[in-house]
Image (spheres, rainbow, N blue to C red):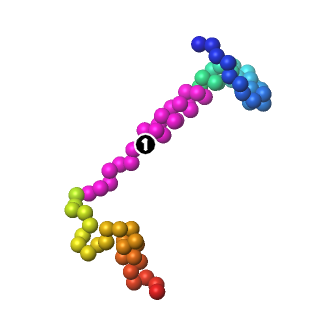
Amino acid sequence: MKTTIEIADSLLERARSVAARDKTTVRALVESGLRREIEERRRRAEFRLRDASFDGSGLQPGVPGDWNGLRDLSYEGRGT
C-alpha cells in the first residue's frame, strides 16, 4: 500500500545514509521500525501481574482494617 508520511528532514537524511550503507531502502527501514515498535507496544500491553495471594481468611483478629490503623501498627514501638 502506498502512503505519505511527514518526517523531519534530518531524520530522512540519516535514514537515507543508513539505507545506502546497508544496501537497503528507506521503505525497508521504516517497515522494520514500525514492526519493532508495534511488537514492543503489544508486549507491554500484555503484562499481567502474577497472583501472589495465598490461602487464608483475611486479617487476623485485632488487626485494623483501615490504612491508618495498619500504618500505626507497623510503626508501633519505633520512635516517639
Magenta segment boundaries in residue numbering: 33-54
Q: Residues within 10 Å of mark 1 (few under 14, many from 20)?
A: few
The answer to if 3 sits in the magenta stretch is no
Find numbered disc 1 in the image and state the secondary structure of the residue it sits on: loop
Instruction: Please indicate, yes or no, whether residue 37 appears anywhere in the rendered image.
Output: yes
Q: Give the residue drawn at x 64%, y 16%.
A: 3
- Residue 21 against residue 46 in the figure, above or below: above
- Circle count: 1
Quadrant of the rendering where the N terminus is positioned? top right
Q: Give the residue drawn at x 43%, y 42%.
A: 47
Q: Nearer the viewer, residue 6 or 12?
A: 6
Type of the residue with mark 1: Phe
The answer to if 53 sits in the magenta stretch is yes
Q: Give the residue drawn at x 29%, y 56%.
A: 53
Q: Nearer the viewer, residue 44 or 16?
A: 44
Q: Position of residue 2 (x, y in %)?
A: 63, 13
Q: Nearer the viewer, residue 39 or 70?
A: 70
Q: Position of residue 45 (x, y in %)?
A: 46, 38
Q: Which residue matches tag 1? A: 47
- Residue 11 against residue 78 in the figure, above or below: above
Q: Position of residue 75 (x, y in %)?
A: 41, 77
Horizontal side, residue 24 vs residue 36: left or right:
right
Horizontal side, residue 12 vs residue 67: left or right:
right
- Residue 46 against residue 9 in the figure, above or below: below
In the image, farthest residue toward the top: 1
Horizontal side, residue 10 vs residue 63: left or right:
right
Q: Quadrant of residue 70?
A: bottom left
Q: Give the residue drawn at x 35%, y 48%.
A: 50
Q: Position of residue 52 (x, y in %)?
A: 32, 54
